[in-house]
Every structure is written in C-alpha cells, then in structure tokens.
Amino acid sequence: MEGTKTFEELKAWQRAHRFTLDVYKISESFPKREDFCLTNQFRRAAISIAANIAEGYKKKGKLDKLRFFNMSQGSLEECRYYLILSKDLNYITEDEKGRLLELLNDSSRLLNSYCKAISDDIH
C-alpha cells in the first residue's frame, strides 16, 4: 500500500469493485422472487468487500486496518457461497461462476498479501 494516495489505487479494491459491478449485472437476470433474498444479499456482500477495503485503507492504526480488511474477507467468502448457490439454482452458468470466482480469488489473494504485510509489521 506504500506509495498509494487513494484506496482506488489498490489492486484488491479494483478487483473487488469489478466483482461488484459484475454481480449487479449478472443478478439483474435472477428471478424477481429473489429480489429481497439472494439478489439483495449477494449485492450487499459484494459491496461490503470493496467498501471495507476503502474504509480500512484510511484507518490510521494497523489493527483497525486489519479489522476492516478481515471484514472484507468475510464478505468475500459470503460471496463465494452465493456464487455456488446461484450456479446450483441455475441462475448463472458455470462460465459466469468461473469468471466471477477469478475476480474474487484475485481480490482475496491481494487482500491476504496486504494483511500479511501489515501483520508482519506489527510483530
């Protein structure tokens, strides 16, 4: 994160934001009966990934940063489940699931690296 001026420069945030946009796009085709259930939950969890990265980025304390990045990781795993569920309900294809999982995995890997660097700096 050194050398960055805004959270938007973080690759983990960029992947998470792209994932959120794709979740919005793909969930438009979910059945209307899912509007207040899966569609809403999936979108909220996707938003939470990028939002917590953004909020954590600005925190001054390293433990605060880690707490927000950890919340982001929790939302990331929640979205991983929603991808499985969406595929099993035949709301998305295997290819769509794979493409979204790739973005999710990239964001997760990058976020894990940030957390490790911060954690190593604490100890």
Image (tube, helix red, strand yellow):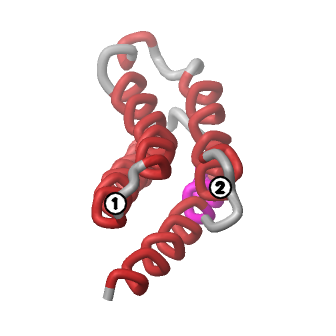
Kindly state the secondary structure of the residue where label 1 is placed.
Answer: loop
Indicate the position of residue 98 as horizontal and vertical percent values.
Answer: 63, 56
Residue on which the image places disc 1: 61
Q: Is residue 43 above or below residue 9?
A: above
Horizontal and vertical percent for residue 78?
Answer: 34, 49
Residue 84 visible from this viewpoint: no
Confirm whether residue 60 shows in the render: yes
Which labelled disc corresponds to residue 10?
2
Q: Amino acid at mark 2?
A: Leu
102 drawn magenta? yes
Task: Give percent across and percent down for residue 18.
Answer: 67, 41
Near mark 2 (Cα within 10 A), the count class, few <14, some 14-19 or many ≥20, is: many
Residue name at image x 64 percent, y 32 percent:
21
State whether residue 105 is above or below residue 75: below
Residue at point 56%, 64% (across, down) = 105
* Disc 1 crowd, CA 10 A, few/some/many (<14, 14-19, 20+): few
Q: Is residue 116 above or below residue 42?
A: below
Q: Is residue 22 left or right of residue 74?
A: right
**Residue 109: quarter of image:** bottom right
Given this view, does label 2 or label 1 mark the residue nearer the observer? 1
Q: Nearer the viewer, residue 5 or 86?
A: 5
Which secondary structure, mark 2?
loop
What span is in magenta? 97-106
Q: Are discs 2 and 1 less than 8 Å apart at CB? A: no
Residue placed most toward the observer, 76 or 122:
122
Image position, residue 4 (x, y; %): 68, 57
Say which quadrant the C terminus sits in. Answer: bottom left
